């Protein structure tokens, strides 16, 4: 199980070191994909394929299924964690989501989320404001 919030920095080569507590629970290859919000998600192969199957099974319209498949598969890469515990995040995913140097890595049970520090703080503050209203 993956859990916790970790603050890290991406280096100039777009590499991000995963916290040891999290990377020890993952094995290569892992899947990096665009999340539902302004984030990236990291999945194990088995959990990723199960998640895709569940998403597609919820759809009835073949056109919707094709569009969802395009979005998911075209924004997913298979990557490895290197010997130093780092992953290289492709430039197009960083650019599309405005991921900056300072990030939060969130453990969410069966996946990790990577957020720009600023975007996550905005998202979290908006959520807190909504539940307090």
Image (cartoon, rainbow, N blue to C red):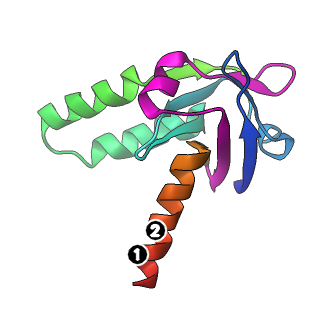
Q: Residue at x 86, y 19 (%)?
A: 83
Q: Nearer the viewer, residue 70 or 17?
A: 17
Is-magenta flag for residue 88? yes
Quarter of image, res 42: top right
Q: Residues within 10 Å of mark 1 (few under 14, many from 20)?
A: few
Percent position (x, y) of residue 124?
A: 52, 62
| Labels 2 & 1 near each other (Cβ < 8 A) | yes
- Outermost residue to the bottom: 133
Q: What is the magenta range?
A: 81-110
In the rendered view, tell whether residue 22 sits above or below residue 121: above
Percent position (x, y) of residue 111?
A: 60, 46
Residue of label 2 = 127
82 sits left or right of 13 in the view: right
Say which element carries label 2.
helix
Q: Nearer the viewer, residue 15 or 32?
A: 15
Give the Cα separation between the discs numbered 2 and 1.
Answer: 5 Å
Q: Residues within 10 Å of mark 2 (few under 14, many from 20)?
A: few
For residue 130, the mark is 1
Q: Residue at x 67, y 45 (%)?
A: 105
Quarter of image, res 26: top right
Quadrant that contains the C terminus = bottom left
Say which element carries label 1.
helix
Q: Residue at x 56, y 48 (%)?
A: 118
29 sits left or right of 59 in the view: right
For residue 5, the mark is none
Is-magenta flag for residue 74? no
Q: Nearer the viewer, residue 49 or 76?
A: 76
Percent position (x, y) of residue 58?
A: 27, 49
Q: Residue at x 50, y 57 (%)?
A: 122
Percent position (x, y) of residue 119?
A: 51, 48
């Amino acid at each position: 199980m993956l859990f916790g919030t970790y603050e890290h920095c991406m280096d100039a080569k777009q590499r991000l070191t995963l916290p040891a507590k999290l990377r020890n629970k993952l094995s290569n290859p892992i899947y990096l994909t665009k999340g539902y919000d302004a984030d990236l998600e990291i999945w194990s192969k088995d959990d990723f394929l199960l998640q895709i199957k569940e998403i597609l099974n919820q759809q009835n319209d073949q056109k919707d299924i094709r569009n969802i498949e395009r979005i998911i598969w075209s924004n997913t890469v298979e990557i490895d964690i290197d010997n130093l515990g780092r992953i290289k995040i492709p430039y197009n995913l960083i650019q599309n989501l405005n991921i900056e140097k300072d990030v939060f890595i969130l453990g969410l049970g069966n996946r990790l989320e990577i957020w720009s520090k600023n975007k996550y703080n905005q998202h979290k503050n908006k959520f807190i404001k909504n539940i307090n209203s």
